[in-house]
Amino acid sequence: MMRRHAMAIVEYSTAWAFRWWRNAFFCSYCDDKFVDTTPLRHHVFNNHLDQKPTKRIFAKVTENNMLKIDVTDLRCKLCGQEVDGIDHLKQHIISEHNKPFNNEYSDGVLPFKLDDAKGFACQKCFVEFANFSKLNEHMNSHYQNYVCEACGKAFVSKSRFRTHVQSHEIGSFPCGECEEILNTRAARMCHKFRVHRKGMRYTCPRCPQIFTTYYARAKHLVGGHAQQKRVYACDGCERVFETSCKRAAHARSHRPVVSHECPHCQWKSGSKAQMTKHLMTHGGSKEDIGQV
C-alpha cells in the first residue's frame, strides 16, 4: 500500500523520484549518476517528467525503504493546480479528482527540495542543512519507523536501522584481511576502511579516477569536470573557507576563551586536556582533574 501511494503521488504530480547512494544522486528512471542536483533536475525535466512512472523507480528501493522524491514547484499533473506539500496534494487529488488514498498507511515517500540556489531544508520542520547528507540523516527524526531498543534512536528504513543495531553488538569480529580482531562490527568496518582501503574511498563519480582524500577528489571535480567550487562562509564574520573543517577551526575564534587555572601553581591554559595533563605533573588527584 505504501508503494501504491508513492506511485500515485509521482504519477499525479510533478514530484519525481531519485536515489542517494555514496554521496551521489541517481535518476530512479534510468540510473544515470550525478554529483550535483542541478544537472539531475535538468536531466529528469528533459527526459522523464512527462513519462508515466513504472515499478522501475522502486527497483533499488530495498526492503521497506521509502521513495525519495523532489517536490520543488509541486503541482497537480491532472489540472495544473499548484500545491503546498504532499498533504495538500493528497487532499486535492482526493477531493478534486476522486483518487483514492488509504490514510491508515504511510505515503511511502520522503519529500525533498533539490534546489541548489536555496540550499537543503527539511520539508517537515524547515531546518536548513549545509549538505544533502546531513538532511538525509535528519529525516530519521521525522519518520521513526524503526526504533533501537538499546538506545532509543529511531530510523526511517530497516537498512539504516540494521546498520545502527550492529554498532551495539559486542564480540570477536576478525578483520578477514589481517590478523586484527575487533570487538564490534562498526570497529571492524572502520578498521578496514582505515587500514586496507586507503585510496579507494574517494572515487570520482564522473570518471574512473580514484583519490586518497576527499579534498583531492573535490579539487579534481572543480578542475577536471568544471564543477562549481564550493565555499564555506563563517556565520560570525565575512570570511569564507575551502572546507568545512577549516571553517569550524576558525569558528572557535569567535567563542569566548575559557581559561583553566591550576590549583597548585599559577599555570593557566585554554585547553581542558592540557590542564589535565599539567595536573598529572603535580600528582593531581581524581578530584582535582574532575574539577578542571
Image (spheres, rainbow, N blue to C red):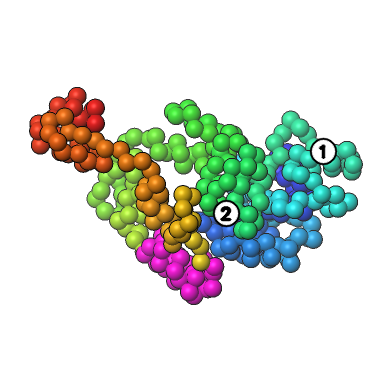
Q: Give the SS element for disc 1.
A: helix
Left/right placement of residue 23 relative to residue 97 reads left
Residue 193 or 110: which is nearer the viewer?
A: 110
Q: Residue at x 74, y 43 (%)?
A: 85
Asked if residue 227 lies in the magenta stretch, the reply is yes
The answer to whether residue 32 is above or below residue 256 is below
Left/right placement of residue 67 relative to residue 130 reads right
Tell me the residue that label 1 is attached to: 91
Q: Residue at x 24, y 27 (%)?
A: 291
Q: Earlier in the sequence, mark 1 or mark 2?
A: 2
Residue 17: x and y in percent read 68, 53
Residue 232: x and y in percent read 48, 57
Tell me the amino acid under the disc marked 2: Trp
Name the quarter where the N terminus is drawn: top right
Tell me the residue that label 2 is attached to: 20
State which region is magenta.
201-228
Name the quarter where the C terminus is drawn: top left
For residue 45, which quarter of the picture? bottom right
